[in-house]
Image: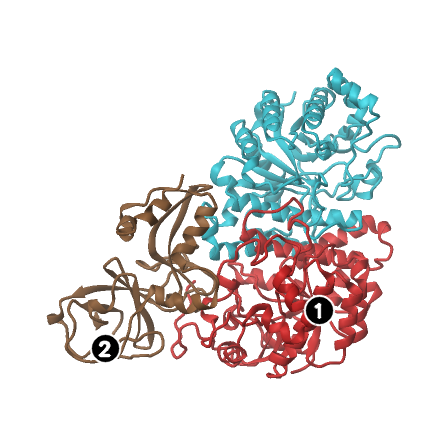
Amino acid sequence: MTRHIVAPVAELPPGTRKFLTIDERPIAVFNINGEFFGLLNRCPHQGAALCEGPLIGLAQSTDPGTIEYTRLGEIIRCPWHGWEFDIRTGQSYCDPRRFRAKAYPAHVEPGASVVKGAVCGRDVVGLGRTRLRGGGFVIVIPGRALTSAGGSAERCLPTRALHSRADAERNTRPERTACLHTTRHANVLLKPLNERSNRWQTGSRALKDRLQWR
Amino acid sequence: MTAMIAGGVDCDLHPAVPHLTSLLPYLNDYWRDQVTTRGMVDLVSQSYPANSPITSRPDWRPSKGKPGSSLADMQAQVLDRFKVSYGICNPLYGVQMVFSEDMAEAFCRALNDWLVKEWLDKDTRLRGSIVIPVQSVEKSVAEIERCAADKRFVQVLMLVMGDMPLGKRAYWPIYAAAQKHGLPIGVHAGSNYHNPPTSVGWGSYHIEDYVAQAAAFQTQLTSLIVEGVFARHPGLKMVMLESGFTWLPSYLWRLHKFWRGIRMETPWVNRAPLEIVRSNIRFSLQPVDAPPDPETLNRLLDHMQSDELLLFSTDYPHWQFEGDAALPEGISDDLVRKIMIDNPHATYPRLKQLAPA
Amino acid sequence: MNMQFRSGAGPGASAGVGTAIADCDIHPARKNGLKDLYPYLAKRWHEHLEVYGKHPYQGMMEGPPYPKAQPNASRRDAYPPEGGPQGSSLSFMQQQHLDPNQVALGILCPLQTGQGIRNQDLSAALATAVNDWQIAEWTGKDSRLKGSIVVANEDSPAAAAEIRKRSGDRNFVQVLLLSRNVEPLGQRRYWPIYDAAAEAGLPVGIHAFGFGGNPITASGWPSYYIEEMVGHSQCQQTALASIVLEGVFERHPGLKMVMIEAGFGWAPSLSWRLDKSWQRMRSEVPHVRRPPSEYIRDHIYWTTQPMEDPERRDHLFDVIDWVGWDKLLFATDYPHWDYDEPSRVLPPGVSDANRQAFYLDNARKLYGGA
């Protein structure tokens, strides 16, 4: 399997994503809590730019009125019809059997083991290209900043920055607090966050307290 | 004409209360006097004006009295003629229209007692639906508990158009009680007229109201599904009575399409709406709002993707078909058997608990 | 099943269907809310709006009673780069939608206007302002676009006057109403609107939404947005039944109507139910001289979005056969979130003639060629 280098880890902090093109395939790489995941930037439903959608959590319920909201930041909503996809696996939540976003595994490798000069990547405006040889591929992220050039001109768009463009135009708040706003006012009982989500919430005690509603 | 088979279950019969005064023996002293001293009149719903063509097939209309008020007529015209083994009585007396919950409770008790004495006791094939005073959820639950002991009650009856959508959680104690006793909820065409009888206001005509029943069933089905009634009550079945069913496939396509995008709004809906319908919803056969050609209807039945959804009914004495053509043209023998026998028994487990004599 | 990857097109970029299409439901938005209408509104209304607002037939001063699925009920990638809400920039609409999809005829259906509000003078003022705005900012700048005459839906003499004012103006190709009003749309209070539309030779488009003070189901107010969205189908069924049973088409044998954004899959079953009920109860409505399905067949068109989406395409083709390939008008609902991507709505197996009718020719015949 061909490895493709995406970016130095420092350029893709947790909660951000980076857009690239590999062999004409538009792909986004996400950093979720220090783990990396790649998704084809095309919704399997009608072809929208899936990876430009907002990140939310997973709403589940086994009893109407009680919502378990976990995995904050790990679910992406398609910018068109709002279908929810699991960034880790590409699985859809509305029809997991029939619809799945194409997922690409990604991991970190120490910088020294990486071939220099093969960085590709873009922000939402620019495009970078590289040739893909053979079938499926692995996206590899070096563990140390590369000494070669190329990476500095490209920016990762943090999740919030993507929204800030939209935020300026609309009167709703950024996605995370908008979700909380809705659930709180709906008087919904939220179960305590699971451990994975707790990690996400570290440092934000007020946020966590608000979620322990009722 | 598709022939019926013997031993079927007629899931929608309408025995008629001759007049409000017929319920007097079943009311307590206070209510008996309220009826008489205040000059209360018959509770006839606009949904079925007595002389409307839909209310009675011409050859079923008696020379005197309300259509459906004579047991002998029902026996001759439907029970004996169509050789059914069971007939489920859904009284459509207008008790849901009154506003006082106490009055509604009194009338519902009387109506249920009247059904037992004047109908269920007199023909062992007959079964009944418990009419509940939906004006009060608490009183409805009490009435279910009271009547459920009589195994001849096989269903709880509600109207498709009431004060609020049927999926609302306020109603759920009714559903819990029904599920507990193995009683499906029958949702029947008709309105209490506390809201306009269409989703776009008050129309002019009776025919307009009748056509709009189908749309009311659609919005109620949405409510029942997305509110998660069947997530909380997985064993509960609901039967759409006199609803029509040919609207079902395209309705489900639309619901499914939106559900996929707004799943997070109602995350307890964790199965596709079609699956929920398959497991928990049924439809009585009449009216079959279909085109005259059997080929189109068979295509439509294919769209429904299940042969377990339809339950045989005549909707007696309402005028839905001519002569003995209660079954649509051109359906297979297998489907006839499912519609007339298998599906009803799978839906109403209490039917067989007391075999007819 | 998953969409096959297509090389060449950027993610989310429309690639069209290879031929010119019509889009019979486009929603232009205003960059600065009601302020953009001030140039077309008498000054007294500027302050009135700022002090009293629109005063609609529902409780919220801002926003809809049922929160939408996406901000502004629109695609998140449809924000114009220069700012403003989705659908507010003609140039971006051209770039993102009209040009790549080869839209040869785009029908504007402005929402959030003065329809469904309780102050009738304001409703009429906003209607005429929106119509002026459509010409100034849209149809006057891109000849592919055609406007709908927005009218004060609850004040039909004022509405008729607005239609007469715009009659003959080729910027407009239909009159626009919404499906939820104070009364069902067949009622007499709305007849002057149909009289004027028929006189002007214009079809009447009936778009989902609106508020008339009635609960949006016949059994009260539901809880969720999904119930409202699915419920547009039921609202239009009952609105259409009212129109037919009140004899609007007997009164206007040449009038055409377009059911917009409520689907079309329900048309056959509604037609069959209407016919059956009419056979029984036609004595109540002697003015309905023909089976209702014939009026529907002769007078009604259907926009396609949100496209019926059964798992099996033969089921879809059955329904379209029953409705008529000649009755469907392709629409995307751009820029709304439930947008139908043109190249994704028709499964394979459609004849060239039907495809052409579906995507363009039916609209051209109804609205006039672009």
The residue wearing badge 1 is C125
Chain letter, disc 1 residue? C
Q: Secondary structure at mark 2?
A: loop
Residue at image position (60%, 66%) is: C304
- Residue A152 has which mark? 2
Task: Note whether B11 is above or below C274 in the view shown.
Answer: above
Residue C213 percent across, percent down from the top left: 68, 52
Display colour scheme: by chain
Quarter occupied by the C terminus of chain B = top right
Asked if one can make out residue A14 in the rendered structure from this viewpoint, the answer is yes
Q: Is residue C221 left or right of residue A77?
A: right
- Residue B262 has which mark? none
Residue at image position (30%, 64%) is: A16
Q: Which chain is cyan?
A: B
Please count the marks in the image.
Answer: 2
Residue B332 percent across, percent down from the top left: 62, 47
Task: Note whether C75 is above or below B250 in the view shown.
Answer: below
What color does chain C have in the rendering? Answer: red
Q: Secondary structure at mark 1?
A: helix
